[in-house]
Image: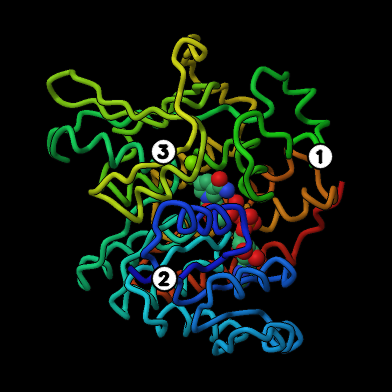
Amino acid sequence: MKISILGATGSIGMQTLDVVRTCLPHAKIAALSGFSNIEKLSPLVEEFKPNMVWVPDDASASVIAGLTRNHPEILTGEDGLISIAAESDAEILVNALVGRAGLAPTLAAINAGKNIALANKETLVTAGELVMRLAREKKIKITPIDSEHSAIWQCLNGGTISEVEKIILTASGGPFLGWTRDKISAAKASDALKHPNWSMGAKITIDSATLMNKGLELIEAMWLFNQPMQSIEILVHPQSIIHSMVQFIDGSVMAQAGLPDMRLPILYALSAPSRIKTDFPRVNFLEKNNITFETPVIENFPCLSLAQHAAKIGGTLPAVMNYLNEWAVGQFLQDKIGFYQISDIISDAFGIYNVKPVISLNDITEAEDWAVNFIGGKKWQQ
Ligand code: NAD
Ligand code: MG
């Protein structure tokens, strides 16, 4: 199996390489991409010897070119990232990029006939209709890396899509579970970055704190499993042991459980339907003997209801929401805006945006351009 990994230096990218190193001895790495962290990328290029490497600019390219042991083709710039997704000789592309940067390489890889192991949920939030349609046309498999979607996919082995009554999408609740709204409103990025169960990149960690992550995952699940919003229930399960469940029409429920370890869904996305033996830690149910469920406190997490609204309306609205969320999370991470300004920005935009149907990629580009202008026309400072 030949694999390319976009976003190799990130949380999912590094864990994917760990899975390749420890569980898939016959896999070859065809291409890797990094971004700002060239010191992290260089040893990966030396170890895995990909034929193609992507870095953002010429300065980083010369660092990679200076590595003595192998001489990969080095590409740069936005077009280069698209080329590497399409042109490497990999059969499967692991998309571990963060944010909307993941969309164009995914489309290019599908067009080039590559299967996709998808961590980058923003791809489906922004353009789920286009991506899934193209994947169907090109007979491409999109296998989920997101732990909840991996769980749902595994539970679906227990029946067919037409026998599904509902999907139960579980959420850890994030670092602000149980906090009052006043306390949350004073939270800084450093508070939001303390996730109780998962160690992840900064953007998804903030999305977990606002519960936007669960909203993005709702939209991701609707596209991946062709389900209407009403058949997906969100339940907070603070222990993160049950990664999601599927209830079938006979009332039977399948659940997928495991420790919160992203290497499990990454491995399954690359090996399914086979299971590969690992020495990863196992769940001890005698220790994890307090597994609980509750409904999300929606008043404290307005991003979740905004995402539910976007899921219901559809068209270009999720792309606008995704763009504004990504921008606002970036501002919050620099302590330039407050926690609830993330949702305020999205909510203000929803109040004036005219939603359009998504016919082509051009509709997404126009929606994102609208979001850029919207941000430009406001002063979002505390
Ligand atoms: P991360 O920030 O740790 O890594 C992102 C990677 O993308 C890095 O290699 C970075 O260099 C690269 N990158 C960032 N911006 C880029 C750009 N503009 N162009 C090219 N490369 C760029 O993020 P992560 O936590 O690994 O998350 C990656 C994706 O997986 C996200 O969509 C996230 O929602 C999803 N996901 C992550 C986890 C997790 O446990 N980390 C779990 C489920 C889903
Ligand atoms: Mg998830």
Q: Please determine whether, in this image, residue 109 is positioned above or below residue 237.
A: below
- Which part of the image, by quadrant, shows the N terminus? bottom left
Q: Amino acid at mark 3?
A: Glu
Q: Could you tell whether 240 is left or right of 192 in the image?
A: left
Numbered disc 2: secondary structure: strand
Q: 357 or 93, which is in the foreground?
A: 93
Q: Could you tell whether 110 is left or right of 145 in the image?
A: left
Q: Amino acid at mark 2?
A: Lys
- Work out whether mark 3 precedes mark 1 in sequence or the reverse, and give the earlier one: 3
* Residue pointed to by mark 1: 190
User: Mark 1 Cα within 10 Å, few/some/many (few <14, many 20+)?
Assistant: few
* Residue pointed to by mark 3: 148
Numbered disc 1: secondary structure: helix
Residue 352 visible at all = no
User: Mark 3 Cα within 10 Å, few/some/many (few <14, many 20+)?
Assistant: many
Q: Mark 3, mark 2: which one is toward the viewer?
A: 2
- Work out whether mark 3 precedes mark 2 in sequence or the reverse, and give the earlier one: 2
> Could you tell me which residue is drawn at 53 percent across and 71 percent down?
48
Measure the alpha-carbon separation of dots 3 and 2. Answer: 27 Å
Q: Amino acid at mark 1?
A: Ser
The answer to whether the residue bearing label 3 lies less than 8 angstroms from the nearest atom of ligand 2 is yes
Measure the alpha-carbon separation of dots 2 and 1. Answer: 38 Å
Q: Mark 2, mark 1: which one is toward the viewer?
A: 2
Q: Could you tell whether 53 is left or right of 63 in the image?
A: left
Query: Which corner quadrant of the image does residue 73 belong to?
Result: bottom right
* Residue pointed to by mark 2: 28
Q: 282 or 202, which is in the foreground?
A: 282
Residue 95 is situated, as x and y percent measured from the top left of the image, at 47, 63
Q: 197 or 39, which is in the foreground?
A: 39
Q: Please determine whether, in this image, residue 297 is positioned above or below residue 344.
A: above
